[in-house]
Image (tube, helix red, strand yellow):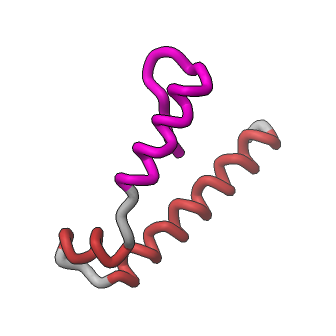
Amino acid sequence: MAKAVGSNNSYSMVNATFDALKNMQSPRDVAGRRNKKVSDIVSGREVQKDADVAAAVAADTGE
């Protein structure tokens, strides 16, 4: 997800998107920098995804 700071005209949004794409890092790069296994990095992504789904369900049901 890219964020354009300031104006959100089309040109700014395209530039912000390309900047975000240029700065993307693979799980292998992140794991190497953190001295962890790739599976540790990717499994954290699944945990966050599950938490986001639970929060969305709770918000929909008013819990």
> For this rendering, which residue is in front, 26 or 62?
26
Residue 44, percent from left and from top: 44, 69
Question: What residue occupies the far top of the structure in this picture?
Answer: 7
**In the rendered image of this protein, does residue 1 appear above or below residue 14?**
below
Question: What residue occupies the far right of the structure in this picture?
Answer: 61
Residue 8, percent from left and from top: 56, 20
Q: Is residue 45 left or right of residue 34?
A: right
The image quadrant that residue 13 belongs to is top right
For the record, the magenta segment spans 1-23
Q: Is residue 63 magenta?
A: no
> For this rendering, which residue is in front, 33 or 45?
33
- Residue at image coords 24%, 79%: 36
**In the rendered image of this protein, does residue 10 appear above or below residue 63?**
above
- Residue at image coords 77%, 37%: 62
Residue 25, percent from left and from top: 36, 64
**In the rendered image of this protein, does residue 21 appear above or below residue 32?**
above
Question: What residue occupies the far front of the structure in this picture?
Answer: 11
